[in-house]
Amino acid sequence: MKDVAISTSQISLLQQKLFAARQALEEMTEEQNEKLHILIQFIGQLSLACKGQNLELDNKLAKLRHKLVKFNQFEDSLPALNEADTILKQQYARVMLQLEDSRQSLANMVSQIQRIDSLPSKLKLEITYFKKELIKPFHTHWDYIPKVEKVVNFYDEILKEKLNLGEQFEILPRHRQAAHELALLLSEIEFRKEQRQQISEMKKSLTEEFELDTLLEAYQVVLNLLLDNIAREKTASQEFLYVLNNALSNVQEVVTDSYSHSVKNFQVTKQLNRDINFQVDNVGEAVIEVDDIDELKNQIALHLSSLRKSLGRKELLENREQTQLKQSVEALRQELKALGKETDSYKERLFEQQKLNLLDSLTQLPNRSALEERMDIEYRNYKRTKQPLWVAVADIDHFKTINDSFGHSTGDKTLQVIAMALKNALRESEFVARYGGEEFVLLLPNVAESDIQPLLNRVREKVKSIPFKFKNQRITVTVSIGAAQIIENELITETFDRADAALYKAKNESRDRVIIDF
Ligand SMILES: Nc1nc2c(ncn2[C@@H]2O[C@H](COP(=O)(O)OP(=O)(O)OP(=O)(O)O)[C@@H](O)[C@H]2O)c(=O)[nH]1
């Protein structure tokens, strides 16, 4: 009995222990599940963070997240978990390879940067240190990104440096030459009044320090202005031709009208003359047959009245013809007057245009205004480059004698031939203008002091060798030349005066010679 009691109490103890153990187990399981839940959530978050690196991995992780949502199916998600694990391992290896590749290409870039000659020394040093840093492998993308940023910074600094030095847009000698030529060209074509300010500013900027953009813009502007001028000139010429055509058709109409009137009047006058002759003849015949004096008087009065009528008609006709003629002549006069006016204005425009072109109409050399422009440009150029610049004045000897002996038009032709010879004797960069009358001015840049006399003597000889033949007479025409070189602090007009004074000396020293004001 005692044994039974012991056994019962032992069982009850065991029961209590069992209950406590079950309770502890339940609590543990609950706690485990809670941890598992947190873990699953964490896996979910982690998988989301991995998204975008590998498509296959993304799919697997999405599947896994889906399975893990159902907590009680955790077992089912194990295969997916394993697969994701394998891909993750592969992905890691791939990322490591990628990082190594990236490291290599960054190192190559840096080597290339090091090859740039004009790197500032500070930057060079920085790059050398940086290259050493690149020897260590990258473990994550976070190692890689700052390095990329650094390389970008290097490029940025190099670019800034280059732009500051202006290397990329450096003005080369050929750009300067192009600007110089454009400025010279602008002096040869003058522009309309309203365009002149713009052109003059442009010329100024082309002869001073300029940027490449200025040159390109200048070309563009000039082209547009020229096209505009051509279009205007074309319209003006068209308008003139239109007016001319109109006036001519009006004149033709008046002439045709007056001709047909004359023809008609001629026919009527002819008929009237016939009538009058007939009536005069009739008077004689009628008078012969009449005996009675009163009857005679009547007959004569009758015939005279008829004659008066015919004569009256004739007079009327003649008056009408006169009036018509006067009207026609007046209409023609008016028409011609209008046409004359139009022609004058067209001539004026042409003259203006010629002036604008800055060419002398006789010799087709640049005229005095063109010379002034060119002097200005050459002077600026001299100021900038300090290259030698010569001004020479050439004057035909005894030109008056040619005019007086062979006539003004021979004189004109002589001027044209000599102008051509002067132009042909010079180089492209040199310039000759007709200053006036029989005087020419030469601008000679970049000629050494030792070369100026031979150069101008060649020019003088060239003119002298032209085989002029006037009225079957061989004539030698010569020129005298005076020249001076621009000197420091001198205005080009002063150089011109010295050259002119030298010419005066040459004229005094029996002409056909070159005198240089050294
Ligand atoms: N045919 C012609 N003659 C001109 C023209 N312009 C000026 N002349 C003439 O050139 C002559 C210049 O004469 P002058 O100044 O006495 O000089 P020159 O006879 O050349 O004598 P020197 O210069 O002293 O050698 C004048 O007879 C002017 O009429 C022109 O366009 N055509």
Image: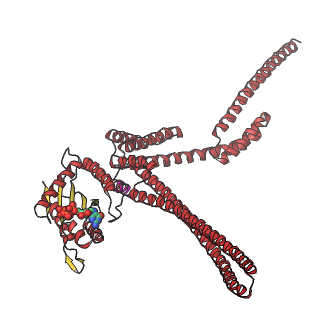
Indicate the quadrant containing the N terminus: top left, top right, bottom left or bottom right. top right
Reply above or below: 52 against 514: above
Q: As drawn, which residue projects farthest toward the left?
A: 509
Which SS type dominates the magenta stretch?
A: helix
User: Quick check: 211 above or below 46?
Assistant: below
- The residue closer to the viewer here, 271 or 267, is 271
Q: Examine the rendering and report whether any part of residue 415 can be seen.
A: yes
Residue at (15%, 56%) from the top-left corner? 502
Q: Position of residue 443 (x, y in %)?
A: 25, 57
Residue 324 rendering spot, x and y as whole percentages: 62, 68
In what quadrant of the picture does the C terminus appear?
A: bottom left
The answer to which of 268 and 97 lies nearer the viewer is 268
Please state the total of marks drawn on the protein image: 0
**180 within the magenta span:** yes
Image x and y of residue 455, in percent = 18, 64
Q: Quadrant of residue 313?
A: bottom right
In the picture, measured across the screen, residue 263 lies left or right of residue 197, that is right
For ligand 1, the image quadrant comes to bottom left
Q: Image point 20% across, 45% down: which residue?
A: 490
Viewer-proximal residue, 511 or 82?
A: 511
Residue 211 seen in the current view: no
**Of residues 138 and 226, which is closer to you in this image?**
226
Q: Which residues are magenta?
A: 179-191
Residue 65 horizontal/vertical position (percent): 73, 38
The quarter of the picture where residue 156 lies is: top left
Residue at 52% x, 48% y is: 97
- Asked if residue 75 is among those painted magenta in the image, a careful observer would answer no
**Residue furthest right in the image:** 1
Residue 460 image-quadrant placement: bottom left
